[in-house]
Amino acid sequence: MHSSALGHNAGGVNGPQEDDIRVEYHPNSGRGTTISRFADFTRAKAQYETPLNEEPWRPAFHSRVDFDFAELVLAAALKKEQVDRLIKLIRTIENREDEFTFNTHTDVKNSWDEAAKKLTPDKVVEHDVWSRNLWDYTQDLLRDPYIVSQMEWDAQKLSRRLPDGTFERFYDEPYTAERFWEVQSKIPRGGKPFGLIVYSDKSKLSSFGTAKAHPVVVRCANLPAAIRNSTGPGGGRIIGWLPIVCGVVNVTSHNLIVTLGQRSWQEARARYLQARVYYKCGDEEQRWLWIFVVIMSADYEEQCYMVLIKGVGSKFPCPVCLVPKEMLTKVWMDHELRTGDKALAILASARRQRTIVETEEVLQQYCLRPVDNAFLELNNSDPYKAISFDRLHAFHLGLFGHYFWPMLKRFIETIPGASTKVDSQFAAFPRWSGLSHFLEVMKVTFNDGNKFADLSKCAIFAVHNIVTATVSPDGYLLICVIRRYIEVDMYSGLECVKTGDIKDGVKWQKKLGKGIRQFADTTKGKTISRDSWEFPKGHTYAHLFLDIIAKGVSKGTDTRPNEGLHGPIRLIYLLRTNFREVAGQILEIDHQFYVAGHIRADIIRLDTAKAEEQKRAVDFGEEDPEDIGHGHFKLRTKQPSTTLRQVQESHSDDPAYSPPGLPPLHVRLSKYLTRVFVDNNIALPGGRNITLDEDDHITEYRLLEVNYESTVDWTTCTDLLRSNPDFFKEERYDGVLIQTAGGQIFGRLLMMFTCIIGESTYPIALVHPYDASVGSTRSQKDKNLGFYRVRARTRSRAEFFSVHSIVRGALLVPDFGKDGDFFVDDLVDTDMFLRMKKLPGYN
């Protein structure tokens, strides 16, 4: 029997405390080091008091309705004729010239359904560069008082006090990492580093790929990721449209074509870059801005264009270091780093040679192209330092999606009946908010990096009892390598990375490299194998943790936020262009969306301010009476009140509610409440033990919102947990992590309800604990695959717990090879990933 508290509080202590946050600003900033209590530390900026614009739609639009109409036209991609016709219809309605009866979309749909019954259903190459002035984009940001108020202007080092009194540094935004610090050290005192994140990648516009786009997107690294990676004001901006060089008349040399493409790419970049400027920002502060490129975010092919190397097949294919092509998988080895200064020296030396052969011999030292790099013209913008690890293409679409997963499927297909069993086990995988649920995987082709990311988190749990060391030794070795890959991937995705995390991540990085090397050697020459594992995407993660130290966490370097812009571009192409010379048309419409987003943001701020003003003037009363709780949790989806007798009778065949040989439900609940009152020094009503009658009422809730502090970045996270017998026609009983007096345990929700004792309402959960003994020694397989095994008690030993004691949700995956055993999925999010590593017995 476990004991749980109804709540807790903590008192204050003077002097240095564990978890204090230290912020050390760059000496050139003129700002001193600060130490604040963890509870007081915030990344929010002091708000610049900006007068609200009462008419943000002017002067472009005469009224708010005009803007709403124009915004709808833009979002719906209406053509000129359609807009004219719609305006004419509006005037017809306004003048009451005809009857308009539609009220909702359903009315329109029903009319079309009725109408449907009447019929039976049945090369010239151009290298144009379109661009926007980068300084114009920068000014758009700097003129906006709200956006400026969210910017960080100085490099800073953040650290947190540990129990022993020392401070541990942590990294998140680019301005907390080394590159910002390095740049601010090089500029004059009082100057402010203004960092840019540059992204570029080709994209298909048409279904068959005959039409392509090559947008260039820029983001401001001085803004926090929540704003920087958004699609609204302060988010990414398309500043250019590069030429796509896919063939040239009378040119057969592939190297010449690629060099021509890189030359066009670099000439386009040169149009965008400026160096430094004084500017009066939207908060009325005059700043001396030093613009530099801190991050280049791109897939491998684009990275080669950015740094002008020869790429795949060359002697040194890595854009960051001079690792020989035959040593790419040996990520535990160090190699000379590329730098802009070295590249300039090599290029200058090559141009002094007398023959093409001699020139090429010099360039081969760096595997460079004979093209000047435009980025080196911008101060502090060494492209080799800016090139960054791309988690999406290197891991999710690359190492796992392109290599590990197809090979794992090949091993599965060699085992009789395994494909069907794998599909059924994936389908039986418990559902979890934010994690894709796969009904079938073996015959499905995935192209989405997010799907591959989720697939990698489920794969080892779904196949471990099929691809075993006995049945498929090489396949089992592969899933062991996949587990190492997942460890590195999870560390790479941390929202805030501490020095200790980097140390642990580097260990797994080396283990992954050696695991891939072992697998390659073991399978060499066999039926299921690769000719070579020495490919660039199998090496780029060698620089992952150095990138975090230099440029912040991967949400700043990942191409994922920018890839999301390709969808809207594709829609503009399909719905708003004439399919000829589309670059200018697409950029014009994109600019309209950009302007509309800014106006809409101002309107939202105006409406929010007015709503808050009205709320202060009017008493709105309490929160929704249907919900229970606040702060740590909230019970929702309220059910009709019922008696304890009705609950027991409706679950008469369930031993969790009606355990053989034990007292009825109302007696067990009475004993639980009495014990909790005593343990928490709460006065018993009338000084006597609580005694509930079987006709006493309780109120069931089927949704729990539980809030908890992330162990990664200390922000508040929320899990949505259900105990619902009919959630979209399926049972849904989620797992939970519970804090008890004896430590933390896992369990599964069976029912959540409130009962009233005296004048107080108590939230309670009936939980099936998963804390039966699994033995004192973990199996080697569990260790190899990182499994944390738990075992369910007999269902008759279900217990009551206070909802206050639920720490967070937990995804409990059945061990498909052993009934009654489950694995705690530590991969559902980064908090669970780190939280599990602190549990006793987990290694």
Image (cartoon, rainbow, N blue to C red):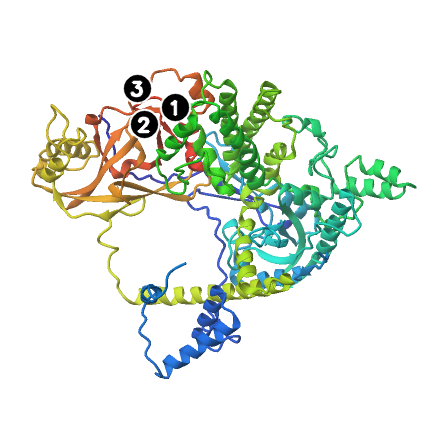
Q: Amino acid at mark 3?
A: Ser
The image shows residue 246, relative to residue 833, as above or below, that is below
Residue 285 visible? The answer is: no
| Number of marks | 3
Tell me the number on the disc at residue 743: 2
The image shows residue 475, relative to residue 322, as above or below, that is above
Give the image location of residue 180, x and y in percent.
63, 46
Residue 429 visible? The answer is: yes
The image shows residue 495, relative to residue 667, as above or below, that is below
Q: Which residue is mark 1?
A: 840
Q: Are marks 3 and 1 in contact (CB under 8 Å)?
A: no
Q: Amino acid at mark 2?
A: Gly
Q: Are marks 2 and 1 in contact (CB under 8 Å)?
A: yes
Q: Left or right: where does residue 233 sit relative to residue 129?
A: left
Q: Badge 1, how many Cα within 10 Å: few under 14, some, many 20+?
A: few
Secondary structure under tag 2 reads strand
Q: Nearer the viewer, mark 3 or mark 1?
A: 3
Secondary structure under tag 3 reads loop
Q: Badge 2, how many Cα within 10 Å: few under 14, some, many 20+?
A: few
Q: Nearer the viewer, mark 3 or mark 2?
A: 3
The N terminus lies in quadrant: top left
Give the image location of residue 31, x and y in percent.
58, 50
Q: Which residue is mark 3?
A: 773
Q: Amino acid at mark 1?
A: Pro
Alpha carbon of mark 2 to alpha carbon of mark 1: how far? 10 Å
Q: Kindly give the residue lying farthest to the front in the view shown.
A: 120
Alpha carbon of mark 3 to alpha carbon of mark 2: how far? 15 Å
Q: Quadrant of residue 557?
A: top right
Give the image location of residue 526, x and y in percent.
59, 20
Closer to the camera in the image, 373 or 482: 482
Q: Residue at x 19, y 26 (%)?
A: 796
